[in-house]
Amino acid sequence: MTEVARSAGVSVSTVSHVVNGTRLVATATREKVLRAMLLLGYEHRPIARSLSAGSNQTIGLALTAASNPYWVDLVQGIDGEATRAGLNLIIVDTRDDARHEAAAVANLLAHHIEGLVIAPADGWRDLTLPLLRDHPVPYVIVDRIDPDLRADQVGVENEASTAAVIDHLISAGHTRIGMIAGISGLATSAERLRGFRLAHHRAELTVDPDLVVDGASTSEGGRRAALALLDLPDPPTAIFAANNDMTIGAMAAFKAAGIRIPRDLAIVHFDDFAWADLFTPGMTAIAQPSAAIGARAVQLLLRRMTDHEAPPQTIRLPAEIMHRESCGCSPAA
């Protein structure tokens, strides 16, 4: 603790409060302590003591707390299943940043959690994954599946569902389809891009690289990407937005530009949300079973907590296309 205090530039008592949760510590100070613990490997010892002391019936959840309805439904599914199993849940915000995620997970480990559900940030393999491999704490990856990792994972069928909705646009006569893509380092972004390309390949269409624009998985990124697509010399006749935050940004851009949906431009998107059918026109969307994904993640975690030697499972749940008017045809079609 003295070494951690010296490295972080704080008192030993402050380190103690962070480790044991005995007093509220300012966020910036706590993060300095956690970074020092991470560098010095201090967290091994309190975790070992916690495990030897017995169960505390608490699991952790690490994911971005961005105001996206998908995450809200996912958390509800996780919390509901954890409650049914008699488990407490501690949630930390990773901010979709690998360094902040590692500090947040180190904090959870220092609080002696017995299992972890994590939606990993880009770059997590370099910082967070080594932490989890160094500790006897079971974990499950949710949403952002890594096919090269032997671990319990659960998410949605991103590639197949994206290909299906792009197939629909192509069958409606669109040959220049734009894509507002998510953060490039995320597994979900890569899978949805593969689905976009797969549909074009099946229709023997070439994907114009100019039609795939980074939307950074945010509303503002979606707005900028939509404007970039509209500014092309040969703009798309339809657009696929790879999450609902980017969809909202894109719709704001279209409204400002006087674009009429679907008369001037068709749009479809990933991640349905409660008010999508209240838009005029209603938004054609890919709906994820978010709560079911969250509940299944906890079930996998409980299995792993009971049997550390069980073979890892990767579970993909199907998505559903909610067919409305923004694609340019009636829902009955």
Image (cartoon, rainbow, N blue to C red):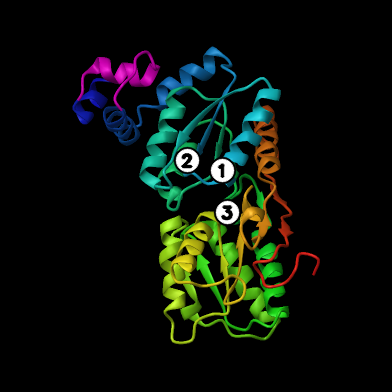
Which badge, 1 or 3, is on the more N-terminal residue? 1
| Residue 208 percent coordinates (x, y) | 52, 83
Whether the residues at callouts 1 and 2 have beta carbons within 8 Å, the answer is yes
| Range of residues picked out in magenta | 10-26
Which badge, 1 or 2, is on the more N-terminal residue? 2
Q: Mark on residue 71?
A: 1
Amino acid type assigned to the residue bearing label 3 in the image:
Asp
**Residue, disc 2:** 65
User: For mark 3, does the 10 Å Cα neighbourhood hold few (<14), some (14 to 19), or many (20 or more) residues?
Assistant: some
Q: Give the camera-side residue of 161 and 324.
A: 324
The structure residue drawn at horizontal position 44% and vertical position 63%, both measured from the top left corner, is 223
Say above or below: 195 vs 79: below
Residue 298, quarter of picture: top right
Residue 319, quarter of picture: bottom right
Can you see residue 311? no
**Would residue 20 be counted in the magenta stretch?**
yes
Pick the quarter of the image with the C terminus: bottom right
Say above or below: 104 vs 213: above
**Residue, disc 3:** 146
**Would residue 36 be counted in the magenta stretch?**
no
Pick the quarter of the image with the N terminus: top left
User: For mark 2, does the 10 Å Cα neighbourhood hold few (<14), some (14 to 19), or many (20 or more) residues?
Assistant: some
The structure residue drawn at horizontal position 49% and vertical position 64%, both measured from the top left corner, is 250
